[in-house]
Image (cartoon, coloured by chain):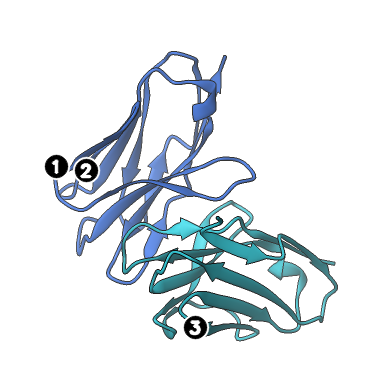
Amino acid sequence: ILNVEQSPQSLHVQEGDSTNFTCSFPSSNFYALHWYRWETAKSPEALFVMTLNGDEKKKGRISATLNTKEGYSYLYIKGSQPEDSATYLCARGSARQLTFGSGTQLTVLP
Amino acid sequence: DTAVSQTPKYLVTQMGNDKSIKCEQNLGHDTMYWYKQDSKKFLKIMFSYNNKELIINETVPNRFSPKSPDKAHLNLHINSLELGDSAVYFCASSQGVYQQYFGPGTRLTVT
């Protein structure tokens, strides 16, 4: 994997469903993996920063895991709510910069 | 209090003009960035400054020039604007390489 890739590109779920999406990244020279939440007409907002293989982070109903050896991270949302609708971006951090994926656009239907 | 602010929020201008976008952060961070959101909504790094020193200068036309008068400010000046410069430009800041805090974005439209 040469770039940061996210899947799926978009996702529609019903309120109350749990969901997850994937971020894949080059595993060599890994430094950090960031997740951001980006609502329409707003700016990206940091959710998590993970650095160690096996890291798990949680904030309310949202959690994330990290596998640096195989180069992927999962973001989980438990019991999705309409206010969770947003684009979720992951970014691979080097010592100097972040490289962003294209995001997963989540729509939670009431 | 706004952590990272940008002005203006919207900028409509004609081709060939020169314009500036200002960014200020009150978080005490040592690193500031400019990103361009392209037509596919990718965030692409343009510049990064650490303690007023340029540390990243990605392949952008030299019509774009960042200026950091102090650690709390990173302005973006664009000469001879072209239609393809139309985009949303985001400023961000961080302490070292930790999580970044983004400004609200400046939507630039070149006509």
Q: Secondary structure at mark 2?
A: strand
Query: x, y (%) of residue A12?
Result: 52, 23
- Answer left or right for B83 relative to A31: right
Counting other residues with Cα less than 10 Å from the Cα at mark 1, is it few (<14), some (14-19), or many (20 or more)? Answer: few
What is the x, y in percent for residue B26? 49, 66
Please tell me whether mark 3 sits on a helix, a strand or a loop. strand
Which residue carries the number 1 mark?
A: A54
Which chain is rendered blue in the image?
A
Q: Amino acid at mark 2?
A: Leu
Marks 3, 1: nearer the viewer: 3
Chain of the residue where label 2 is placed in the rendered structure? A
Q: Callout 2: few (<14), some (14-19), or many (20+) C-alpha neighbours within 10 Å?
A: many
> In the rendered structure, are the residues bearing label 2 and label 1 in contact, judged by CB atoms less than 8 Å apart?
yes
Residue picked out by circle 3: B70
Q: Earlier in the sequence, mark 2 or mark 1?
A: 1
Q: How much space separates mark 2 and mark 1, taking CA atoms?
A: 5 Å
**Could you say which disc has been placed on residue B79 in the image?**
none
For the point 58% across and 51% down, which residue is it?
B41
- Looking at the picture, does residue B58 appear above or below residue B89? below
* Mark 3–mark 1 CB contact (< 8 Å): no
Question: Chain B is shown in which shade?
Answer: cyan
Pointers 2 and 3 within a single chain: no
Spot occupied by residue A92 in the image (x, y as percentages of width and height) = 32, 56
Q: Nearer the viewer, residue A63 or A8?
A: A63
Residue at image position (31%, 65%) is B97
Q: Is residue A4 left or right of residue A84?
A: left
| Amino acid carrying mark 3 in the image | Asp
Q: Which quarter of the picture shows residue A94?
A: bottom left
Cα–Cα span, label 3 and label 1: 39 Å
Q: Label 3: few (<14), some or many (≥20) within 10 Å?
A: few
